[in-house]
Amino acid sequence: PQHSLFLTRNQNLVHKVYFIYSINIKHLCLMNYLAKPAPAVEAAIATDAPRCKAIKIEDAQEVEPATADKANIVEPAAIFDIKRDAFVSNEKGKNHSMSAKFLRGKSGADFESVLAVLRGAPKKNFLKKVLPILYDERDFVSFGEVKRYVIVKGDCCFVFTEKDDIQPLYAIPLSDFVAIQEDPKNLDKHSVTISPLSATLSRGSLVTILLKHPDGSQGYQFTFDTSEDRSIAKRFLDIFNSISVLETTMSSVLTGNAANKQY
């Protein structure tokens, strides 16, 4: 019995030791997972902000007021642009000349007819210049010699030798001239007397319109045969005057716009 009691006491003591040992082991394991305490640091000290130079705003400098330049006066736009509409390309890339058919286009021509056309004034020989009283005879030419086919498109007059020619001899910018109907009783000294196309016709059937440069010099002479159409010369003159009115109106508008831009 004493031996059994000794064993029982020893077993209890072993259990207590083991229990205490187990607790210490667990405590040590937990300590390994815990964060280390923060190290001690010095107290924070705030420093004064550095001083900056004060911003100085300078006064705005005075400048000269802006002035608008006067707009240049340009020529009014032409109804028919000869440079733009002179030629069209065919499928092979070649150019078709300005035939009468091409000039008519879809809208047609403003005027076309057969008439006598002379460029400039007749040249005077030495005797006519030195002795105008003795040698003041007028120059004569037959209608057939200077007969031309004329088409007016916009402000351009195209002069052909024949109606079916593929291109005109030249083009006349009508807006550069002043048209004057010649008085048959007071002939212009720079004009040429045109003989009728037929011997059966009288000179009274011929009406001449002179295209003068602004300085009064002779530009062109147009002589119309009115035996079959008494109004043909008047129709040409009406078209010419309508072009002049349009050019004057467009010039006035452009001049007015240029003047308004200055203000």
Image (spheres, rainbow, N blue to C red):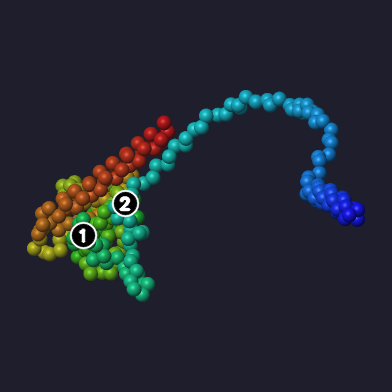
**x, y percent for residue 215:** 33, 44
**x, y percent for residue 122:** 29, 56
**x, y percent for residue 228:** 9, 59
- The local secondary structure at tag 1 comes to loop
Q: Nearer the viewer, residue 29 or 94?
A: 29
Residue on which the image places disc 1? 108
Check the image and report above or below for 205 versus 89.
Answer: above
Residue at x 27% of width, y 60% of height: 158
Residue at x 33% of width, y 65% of height: 87
Residue at x 89% of width, y 54% of height: 1
- As drawn, the label of residue 236 is none
Residue 34 visible in the snapshot: yes
Horizontal side of residue 44 vs 209, given as left or right: right
Residue at x 25% of width, y 56% of height: 153
Residue 216 visible in the snapshot: no
- For label 2, count other residues whose C-alpha is less than 10 Å away and answer few (under 14), some (14-19) or many (20+): some
Total marks placed: 2
**x, y percent for residue 97:** 31, 68
Are the residues tagged 1 and 2 within 8 Å (C-beta)? no
Check the image and report above or below for 221 versus 94.
Answer: above
Write down the quadrant of residue 46 in the picture.
top right
Residue on which the image places disc 2? 78
